[in-house]
Image (tube, grey):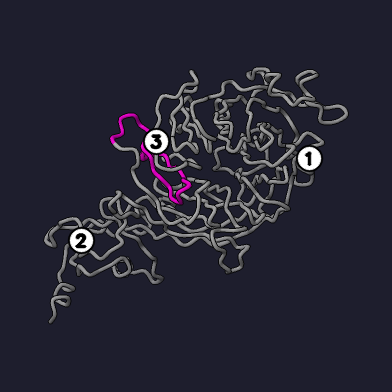
Amino acid sequence: MTAAQTQAYIQVRVQLTTSQPDVALPKTTGPILVNTNFRRYTLSSLVNTLLENETPVPFDFLINGTFLRTSLDDHLTQHGLSSESTLYLEYVKAAVPPVHLASFEHDDWVSSVDVLSSTSTARASGKGPDTQKPGHERILSASYDGLLRIWNMSSQVTATSPSAGDGGHISSIKAAKFVSSLQIASSGVDRTVRLWRYRETSEDSPATIDPHIDLYGHNGSVDSLAVHQPSSRILSASADHSVGLWSTRKSDAPLASESCLPSRASRGPKRRKVGPSTSTTQRGPLALLKSHCAPVSSVIFAPSDPTVAYSVSWDHSLKTWDLPTATPVDTRSTSHSLLSLAALPTLNLVAAGTSARHVTLIDPRASAMSIVAMTLRGHTNAVVSLATDPNSTYSLASGSHDGTCRVWDLRSTKTEKEGRVGQSMYSIGRESLDGKSRASGDGIKVFSIAWDSGIGVVSAGQDKRVQINRGTNIGPEALC
């Protein structure tokens, strides 16, 4: 018998546990001796045998919070452990690759998407659509044609915003968010942030998107928005190097500065005429936050404190802001331009998409000993949009100019010279390619991504489509 064959029959004692009650082994199940050459597939078969499953269920395994991606023997060797020790293996149902559900076609590039559902941040309130029922969710899309559209789950447009002549954006829209089930915020190349009233009275009556308040203050394209509904606050990220803080309530917002208003409107009262008998109120920012020295790419509210914000910029920095005083309280500098941002509050991290084709996980706390906690590698072009899994502490989705969205689990890592590196679980391509490949994402760049508990991963991009993909157990906590 060769040395390799002898090594294959070394055994180690494992204790199997799970936090998912529907696949839990009896409490009396003790440690089991298994061969150290076992990998995930063999261990999964073992658990199915112990559970006496007629239909096998694929499982993943975690050791000390990290997915097992090697044999048990390699894990023991890498961590300097003896085969005489007991390994504690936590098993979870493996994620099923996301499948394509639907695509909504547009006339121009789609720059931004958001979701209104019973579980979304802008959950239904007041007299908005009944999103509590499955299938009654709404998807908001913003396009380079200057229009907002609301879609139902039957791929039908239920409402479209007015054109430029009737009070709409006068150029491409870059960002859009549901503030609530009755209000929408958008921004774009025309340097404005706009608030809209959204009305949907019944399935038989057409829904409407009507101009409500125009917010002026930026001197460059407004490319990203963040909303905090309870405080009626909006944050904006602009190419003019500033972050804007705004109120969604007309009574709280100051008057807009004459210098920021369109020249035609600046000669009259602070209302923009949008029709023969209607006008739109014009307001200014509560504050403009200035410290970045390059375009600001993205901004978010701190999940645990809406008086704190994070912003990222082409100047390679992540800044922490104290909103009541409009001052930066911390700056973290990286090696690359930062293009997108999402918070992982349970892990005390923020994720930043970069121009260098990866996602950087940063600890924004002043007490952090190092800036970069982990790097997620796999994209082949800039990472311009991020969304966290609403059902899991550890899962993240990213959208890239390479034409793909990737789903990550932060427990799927390996250690390299530069530190911990994460590997994506799945890559979601654009259905518009119909199985063909496209170098560097030409014509299929992803511009925006959203993740909803019920709908799934919603993405939009250069192929003029909103695309919906849904998987099972993306984020293993989904069934906990």
Asked if residue 377 lies left or right of residue 3, the reply is right
Q: Which residue is mark 3?
A: 333
Residue lying at 58% horizontally and 69% vertically, measured from the top left? 436
Q: Quick check: marks 2 and 1 in contact, CB under 8 Å?
A: no
Q: Earlier in the sequence, mark 2 or mark 1?
A: 2
Q: Quick check: marks 2 and 3 in contact, CB under 8 Å?
A: no
Magenta residues? 345-369
Residue lying at 71% horizontally and 36% vertically, measured from the top left? 198
Q: Quick check: marks 1 and 3 in contact, CB under 8 Å?
A: no
At which x and y percent is residue 289?
Answer: 53, 24
At which x and y percent is residue 389?
Answer: 47, 47
Residue 13 image-quadrant placement = bottom left
Q: Earlier in the sequence, mark 2 or mark 3?
A: 2
At which x and y percent is residue 79?
Answer: 19, 55
Q: Is residue 312 above or below residue 43?
A: above
The amino acid type, in three-letter code, at marker 2 is Val
Circle 2 SS class: strand
Circle 3 SS class: strand
Q: Which residue is mark 1?
A: 163
Q: Nearer the viewer, residue 152 or 441?
A: 441
Q: Which residue is mark 2?
A: 14
The amino acid type, in three-letter code, at marker 1 is Ser
How far separated are the C-alphas under marks 2 and 3? 43 Å
Q: Nearer the viewer, residue 160 or 255?
A: 255
Q: Earlier in the sequence, mark 1 or mark 3?
A: 1
